[in-house]
Image: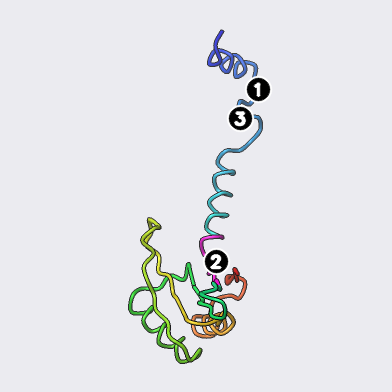
Amino acid sequence: MDFKDFRMDIKDFGIDTNFGIDIDLVKENEKKLNDKFENIIHIRKVKRNNTKYITIVENFDLDKEEAKKFISMAQKVINSSGSFKIDKESNEKKKVFIFNGDVQELIKKTIIEEYKIDENKIKFNG
């Protein structure tokens, strides 16, 4: 008797072959969890050399024109330069914003005030 025959025999006795797990519910929860983590904006502080930092903003989806407006607005707030690049490593080609200096709090404040994004959807890394 191979495994397929065994599963058929279990079904004949009225036993659930998924062991009581609702597969659709598991897939739905997994999708919700992935959506939850995809919508979080990550702000990272990376050390450039001994005394200087750069601030990187990831997962902040804006079209090209909005990205330019965000960069110019943020440059005025932080009094420093900034740019955005398209991440070629990811399949979705997400934009990555790069600012000179440790300006995590100022960038967060700008995003919250101008784009009305919930503070819980912004996460600091580094």
Residue 120 at x, y percent in the picture: 62, 71
Where 87 falls versus 79 (above or below)? Answer: above
Q: Which residue is mark 2?
A: 40
Label 1: how many Cα within 10 Å (few below 14, some 14–19, many 20+): few
Please identify the quadrant where the C terminus is shown: bottom right
List x then y, in percent, for residue 5. 55, 12
Q: What is the secondary structure assignment of the residue under circle 2?
A: loop
* Residue closer to the observer: 80 or 86: 80
Q: Nearer the viewer, mark 1 or mark 2?
A: 2
**87 is within the stretch colored magenta:** no
> Could you tell me which secondary element the residue under label 3 belongs to?
loop
Disc 2 crowd, CA 10 A, few/some/many (<14, 14-19, 20+)? some
Quarter where residue 91 is shown? bottom left
Question: What residue is rendered at 49% in x and 85% in y?
Answer: 114
Residue drawn at 55 percent across, 41 percent down: 24
Mark 2 vs mark 3, CA separation in Å = 33 Å
Task: From the image, tell me which residue sits under label 3.
Answer: 18
- Say what amino acid the circle numbered 1 marks: Ile
Could you tell which of marks 1 and 2 lies nearer the N-terminus? Answer: 1
Magenta residues span 37-44
Label 1 belongs to which residue? 15
